Amino acid sequence: MRDYMIEPTQYDTILRTAMEQSAVDLSCEPEDFCSAGNKVVISRKNENARQYLELPFFFQIVSYGNNVLASVSEDFAPFAEKYINQYGAVRSFETPAILALNDKLMKYGHKVCFMARYYLPVPELIKPLPLDCDFALRVMEKPEFEEYYLPEFGNAICAEHSERDVLTVGAFDGSTLVGLAGASADCESMWQIGVDVLPEYRRRGIASAVTSRLALEIMHVGKVPFYCAAWSNVRSARNAVKSGFRPAWVELTAKSSDFVNKMNGSK
């Protein structure tokens, strides 16, 4: 195993990096996330935003816990300001308020779509975690992991956006890959971690072993790893915490009604 000679990085520095990237994504300033007051800005395209984001947003709200930042279409800005000031940093992301939000969005041809919690590593908690079984871990760069673009590892690496996949850690039972964590270079300073474990190999420490190891590898090359989980994905949230990550910010995204209906398999 690599002897990780990583400069001790304060969590505040990691958090600042995330806020700086969020500011790029949302067309605001990093300090906006730290103020006591909520803020509405008009969303703009930015080539340095996370690559999977479709800009400009019609309605996107983000909170790092202090306030709410809304990055929106100019037409929707008046309602967005009323909404975040009425409900604040917690209730803006809760169902009763979201139902009212969705009613308003539908009048503009949009619906609430994505809700997610994002996690950042706490340096003193990130460490190589042992497997609860006699499997081998292997760090793989391109093209070593090219053969593993398979449906069962679609959260870890994505064939449709393979250009972003830069680094993986796999757990092997003999020659069989049974768990994989992948790093996607979604922006210059931060790499996102995704993870998959074959169903028959779960609850054996594989997910946390590959996640923590990949986080260390990412930090070793000077990038900030981040991890995303849907509200309801308890298994993924537990893995994040076990691997040394802690909740850092939340996001809610509206998309066109056609987009949402297509996701739901309806016309």
Image (spheres, rainbow, N blue to C red):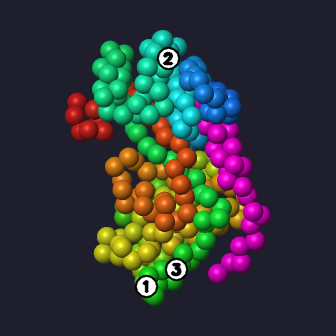
Q: Are marks 3 and 2 in contact (CB under 8 Å)?
A: no
- Identify the residue at horizontal 29%, vertical 35% (top origin): 262
* Label 2: element kind: helix
- What's the residue type where badge 3 is placed? Pro
Mark 3 or 2 closer to N-term? 2
- Is residue 174 shown above or below 109? below
Mark 1 or 2 closer to N-term? 2
**Boundaries of the magenta span:** 1-26
Separation of marks 1 and 2 at Cα, in angstroms: 52 Å
Q: Quadrant of residue 94?
A: top left
Residue 130 - label? 3
- Is residue 177 shown above or below 167? below
- Dot 1, crowdedness within 10 Å: few (<14), some or many (≥20)? few
Q: Quadrant of residue 169?
A: bottom right
Q: Are marks 3 and 1 in contact (CB under 8 Å)?
A: no
Quarter of the rendering occupied by the C terminus: top left
Can you identify the residue that label 1 sits on?
133
- Is residue 181 shown above or below 17? below
Residue 155 horizontal side relative to residue 95, left or right? right
Can you identify the residue that label 2 sits on?
81
